[in-house]
Image: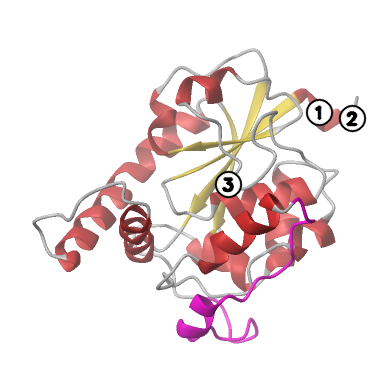
Amino acid sequence: MSPSSSWAVGVCGFGRCGSTMAMMMLAAGGLPPVDGCELPPHELGSIDEAWHAAAQGRSIKLLGPVTEYPITTRVRWRFLWLDRDPVEQARSTIKFVRVFGLAGEADESDVARVARMARTYRRDRSRMLGKLHGLGQVVKLQYELALLDPRRAAQQLRDGLWPALDIDAAAAVVHDRDGRCLPDLSVELAYLESARLGNQLPGPVLGPGAVLSGKPPRDQGLPPAVPGCEGSRQGD
């Protein structure tokens, strides 16, 4: 048993934070997900399943309110917390629920709804992180930084979460896009289709949505710091 196989790695954050990409990075680098969620989006069916899965030596996605539930103490934990620009995260969440018909149109305008959701993310972040810090070591990663510099992000995952992680393999699956909310789900659908066909998951994906976003090259510098997320320029 390797030294790192005695703990579990929880991938945490609010919805639409880049958790599927992070799970793919870990899996490509040699840290498999828990049984039952081997393919994107790497999610179990319920919160109860997530907290009681056999997670030792595995990664598991634990998003949003799951941190409000009792965590198993049968294994030691290390957590990855993913930050994203809260405005873009809110826009992405609204897009997602509309595409999949998970929620009806709100009475409030999109601008007001985005602002309200972004305030909620900023407000609840410290509380969520506080709970995780009480359960194990926490590594914080900025989604936009991972997109801009995949290798640096992979090194951060290796140094803080899984010492045996293959940095090159983990970095190779990072989406080739910027952090702005795309007008469609082309990136997600490309990965799901590849998994459905049973093919090896592709590396960087540039779908039609990324073209519409005006994706800049990765050598144009770091994104702006995320409001309310201290140290975000360093991927804190």
Give me the residue at 65% from left, 12% from top: 74
In the picture provided, is 116 more to the left or to the right than 92?
Answer: left
Quarter of the N terminus within the rendering: top right
Asked which quadrant contains residue 180, the reply is bottom left
Crowding near the residue tagged with mark 1, few <14, some 14–19, many ≥20 C-alpha atoms within 10 Å = some
Quadrant of the image for the C terminus?
bottom right
- The answer to which image quadrant residue 156 occupies is bottom right
Q: Name the residue located 74 percent from the left edge and 57 percent from the top edge.
A: 201
* Marks 1 and 2, how far apart at CA: 5 Å
* Image point (42%, 48%), residue name: 15
Q: In the structure shown, which secondary structural element does the residue marked by tag 1 occupy? A: helix
As for residue 217 lying within the magenta part, the answer is yes
Residue 2: numbered disc: 2
Q: Residue furthest front?
A: 197
- The residue that mark 1 highlights is 5
Residue corresponding to mark 3: 41
The secondary structure type at the circle numbered 3 is loop
For badge 3, the amino acid type reads: Pro
- Is residue 220 located in the magenta-colored stretch of the structure? yes
In the rendering, at what x and y percent does residue 11 appear? 58, 41
The residues colored magenta run 198-222
Residue 147, percent across and down? 60, 69
Main secondary structure of the magenta stretch: loop
Q: Nearer the viewer, residue 1 or 184?
A: 184
- The outermost residue toward the top is 74
Q: Is there a contact, CB below 8 Å, between mark 1 and mark 2? A: yes
Crowd tier of the residue under label 2, counting other residues whose Cα lies within 10 Å: few below 14, some 14–19, many 20 or above: few
Q: Is residue 156 left or right of residue 228?
A: right
Identify residue type, mark 2: Ser
Dot 1 or dot 3: first in sequence order is 1
The residues bearing labels 1 and 3 have C-alpha atoms spaced at a distance of 23 Å
